[in-house]
Amino acid sequence: MAFHHDEHQQRVDLDAEPVVPRGRARSRVLLVIAGGLPTVATLLGFLGLVWWPLDVLANFRFQYAVILLVTAVVSLATLRWKLALLFCLPLALNVAVILPVYLPTTDVQAYRQYGLMSRMVPSATRWDAPDEEAEKPSTQPATTQPAAVEKSPGNSVARRHHRQPTALPVSTQPAGAEDDPQQQSGWWTSDNRQILRLANVYADVPERNMDNLLDYLRELDADVVVLQGVTEDLRHRLEFQIAPFKMEHVAARSDGFGMALLVRITMRPKVRILGAKMIELSHDEMRLPAIVARVRWGRETVSLLAVHAAPPLSSRAEAIRQSQYQAIALWVSNQEYAPVVLGNLSAAPWAASFQTLLAKTALVNSQLGYGMETTWPAGGGFPLGEIPIDHCLHDSDLVTVSRTLGPTLGSDHRALVVHLAWTSDIKRPLIDGFNPKRK
């Protein structure tokens, strides 16, 4: 009887389910939590237009992708195939949303492949020659009222007058002419007069870093600088210490939303500021300022809007930010010249609110083709935690030929430097003797 009992017990043990070690079960739970949270955040981020906190979640898609990639690799290494497949699906969604910032536009591709054309312009029509019409002072006084609302419907691009450049021949400048001032007098080369250099720099730095900020401004490769976080004390200090720049307009504040517009001073300036003034983009008690200006760039003009959108930290702040976005779209639609929006928009490129703004304005994100280039929160020693919320949006007649980030200098934002050129100045191969991009 004992023998039959032992045989039955052995058969029962063989048929029993294998016991999972406690440590392996715990690691599985940790993997599910580590990958499940970014998976949920990834999916909720697509509902940003439904509820604003979900749009905030969408700003961190790059971080979700990194976490999901790590958890998928660990799952594969530990032979958890189903978990790995589960985490790869939201990973693919995030990669699909992020990937466009690494893909250059056709204009950026053409510039990288062919560069800009050199132009032969008669001395009588030098780009820096006085323009009587451009120099006429504006008859409208400066205002701090919100941006005007245009009543007529339709697409903003259709209503905006686009630059119609005169077709000029590709340079046949003889060898050695670049070094000969006499032969160079009628030439504007691709790395000088044809590029507009813009910068967005934060001045809210500790006092011990102020000298570093001033040194950075002096060496900055920019024609026009939007200085964020300007206070009254900083304003008085900068008035005498920002050479080779001069302060064209300033809206000083003590809450971090002050800003100033600086322009480079040279003997033969290629950039001049016409009619700079402050406006308010929202009807609220915060009265956040923005600066608008016409930038006379050689013989052409662009309209510049410097902004600092409210951060979406509460429903009230989000309402202010949305009103600012609406005013930006209306401002763009009212511009006679090619518009450029530069500053802090408090949103990553893949946030639903940001994508809606691009759709309304038909502007081009200068980040396309230049990668992540994260700007905030900088200086914390953890670059993977940063997101790109500082932007330069420009008209489709312009192309970004360079986009770089500067140091933090003690601020929680990195400086953004963007170089723009006209798309019509890009060298392009002729197709049957015709270049469709030349006007």
Image (spheres, rainbow, N blue to C red):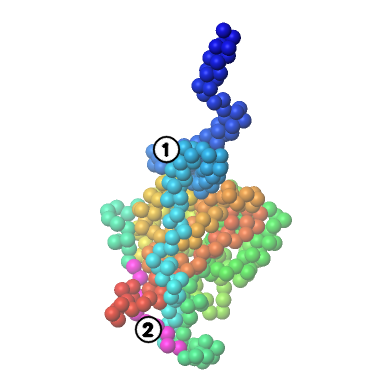
Q: Is residue 169 above or below residue 287?
A: below
Which contiguous range is marked in magenta?
Answer: 162-173
Which residue corresponds to mark 2?
A: 169
Viewer-proximal residue among 341 and 171: 171
Residue 291 horizontal/vertical position (percent): 48, 58
For residue 23, side relative to residue 355 (left or right): right
Residue 228 found in image quarter: bottom right
Which residue corresponds to mark 1?
A: 51
Going 51% across and 52% down the picture, which residue do you hit? 389
Residue 148 horizontal/vertical position (percent): 37, 54
| Quarter occupied by the C terminus | bottom left
Going 52% across and 87% down the picture, which residue do you hit? 178
Question: Could you tell me the amino acid type at mark 2?
Answer: Pro
Numbered disc 1: secondary structure: loop
| Quarter occupied by the N terminus | top right
Numbered disc 2: secondary structure: loop
Question: Could you tell me the amino acid type at mark 1?
Answer: Trp
Residue 82 horizontal/vertical position (percent): 47, 37
Q: Is residue 411 above or below residue 42?
A: below
Going 52% across and 17% down the picture, which residue do you hit? 12
Residue 337 found in image quarter: bottom left
Q: Earlier in the sequence, mark 1 or mark 2?
A: 1
Residue 409 horizontal/vertical position (percent): 65, 57
Residue 60: in sight, yes or no? no
Q: Residue furthest top?
A: 1
Q: Is residue 163 magenta?
A: yes
Q: Is residue 239 magenta?
A: no
